[in-house]
Image: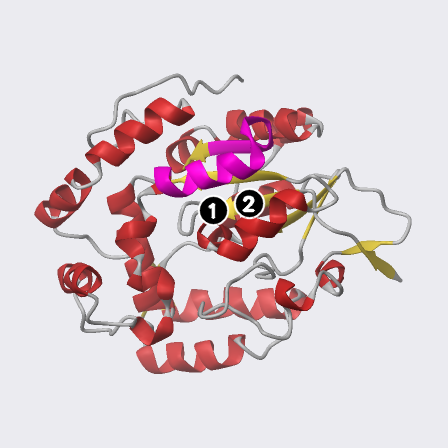
């Protein structure tokens, strides 16, 4: 028997910035219960390609706890919902800060040009929202001119504006306040995972010593399919298979047989031009949220040290 509970911690942004790994690393902690299906998607606006009309806050909070089947007798300190698209959702911004659990929210940010390219590769290779023949340069042009709806995928269609993170974080800060909001970078997550997770543990009130000997495996990395035909079968099946051990086993088998890692090498000139367009946004982000973005184009470094 299980009992549902409302979460008191959200990984609320951003897509393709290591949030799947962060969700798994937190869920493995004995004081944390992470939603078995990582992206709960309950606070998603109508019109989003991940909106589920039958499981949405518009119907009330009843039923939301079913996404968190905490075993009876268990008393986790943290119950976790990790849906990185929440950062862009009006419903999430309106409702999450006022939940009775007084939740905290984590946002992980990635250098904008790299994040946009990873998003492009993910929706082109792992899914079929972006045509296989569309180059990254053509994708950017389509986004800028609004000439493609990418199968109704608003994350692809709004990829450039969504990477102006400071605009979105200001709105969340106005609702949450500084004390209930933690902003991290993908750079730190990749380079210093142990130190980063000790910092997250202290901020959430769980034991940081758990991560002293932890194996930091990566999750949900972008791949390229060897066979597009097999990839189409994979996409059809993963939408209907129940999440669980069998699903994860089949996913590992499929990726071993039909994928190669990576997202392709983008044109350096295109990436440089795209990165330059975010210089002012990145500078404001670093200054307002105290982040070390020294590895990002056009952003000064600030104080974002990670204590061991």
- Is 84 located above or below residue 32 in the figure? below
What residue occupies the far left of the structure in this picture?
269
Q: Which mark is residue 220?
A: none
Q: Nearer the viewer, residue 76 or 302?
A: 302
Q: What residue would you read off at disc 1?
A: 13
Does residue 76 sit above or below 142 in this rendering?
above
- Image quadrant assignment for residue 3: bottom right
State the mark number for residue 11.
2
Is 173 magenta? The answer is yes
Residue 292 in sight from this viewpoint:
no
Prevailing secondary structure class for the magenta stretch in the rendered image: helix
Q: Residue at x 89, y 62 (%)?
A: 1
Q: Is residue 10 left or right of residue 228?
A: right
Q: Secondary structure at mark 1?
A: strand
| 266 left or right of 39 in image | left
Q: Residue 16 lies in magenta, yes or no?
A: no
Local crowd at mark 1 within 10 Å, few (<14), some, or many (≥20)?
many
Q: Is residue 67 above or below residue 110?
A: below
Residue placed at 55% from the left, 53% from the top?
92
Describe residue 252's horizontal placement relative to residue 277 as left or right.
Answer: right
The x and y percentages for residue 235 are 45, 76
Instruction: Where is residue 241? Give x, y as percent.
Output: 60, 77
The mark tally for this picture is 2
Residue occupying the point 22% across, 39% down: 278
Q: Nearer the viewer, residue 237 or 19?
A: 19
Residue 16: percent from left, percent from top? 40, 51
Range of magenta residues = 166-183
């Amino acid at each position: 028997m299980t009992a549902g509970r409302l979460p008191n911690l959200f990984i609320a942004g951003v897509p393709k910035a290591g949030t799947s790994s962060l969700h798994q690393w937190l869920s493995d902690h004995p004081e944390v219960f992470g939603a078995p299906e990582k992206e709960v998607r309950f606070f998603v606006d109508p019109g989003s390609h991940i909106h589920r009309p039958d499981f949405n806050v518009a119907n009330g909070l009843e039923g939301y706890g079913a996404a968190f089947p905490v075993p009876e007798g268990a008393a986790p300190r943290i119950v976790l919902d990790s849906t990185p698209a929440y950062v862009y959702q009006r419903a999430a911004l309106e409702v999450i800060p006022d939940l009775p659990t007084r939740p905290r929210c984590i946002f992980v940010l990635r250098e904008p040009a790299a994040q946009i390219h990873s998003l492009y590769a993910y929706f082109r290779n792992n899914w079929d929202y972006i045509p296989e023949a569309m180059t990254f340069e053509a994708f950017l042009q389509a986004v800028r001119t609004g000439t493609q709806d990418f199968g109704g995928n608003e994350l692809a269609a709004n990829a450039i504006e969504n990477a102006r993170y400071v605009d979105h974080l200001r709105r969340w800060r106005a609702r949450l306040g500084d004390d209930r909001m933690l902003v991290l970078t993908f750079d730190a997550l990749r380079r210093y995972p142990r130190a980063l997770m000790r910092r997250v543990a202290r901020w959430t009130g769980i034991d940081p010593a758990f991560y002293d000997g932890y194996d930091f495996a990566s999750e949900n990395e972008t791949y390229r399919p060897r066979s597009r035909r097999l990839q189409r079968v994979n996409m059809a099946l993963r939408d209907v298979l129940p999440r669980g051990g069998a699903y994860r086993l089949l996913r590992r088998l499929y990726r071993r047989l039909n994928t190669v890692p990576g997202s392709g090498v983008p044109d350096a000139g295109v990436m440089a031009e795209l990165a330059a367009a975010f210089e002012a946004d990145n500078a404001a982000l670093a200054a307002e949220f105290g982040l070390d973005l020294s590895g990002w184009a056009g952003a000064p470094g600030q104080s974002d040290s990670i204590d061991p």
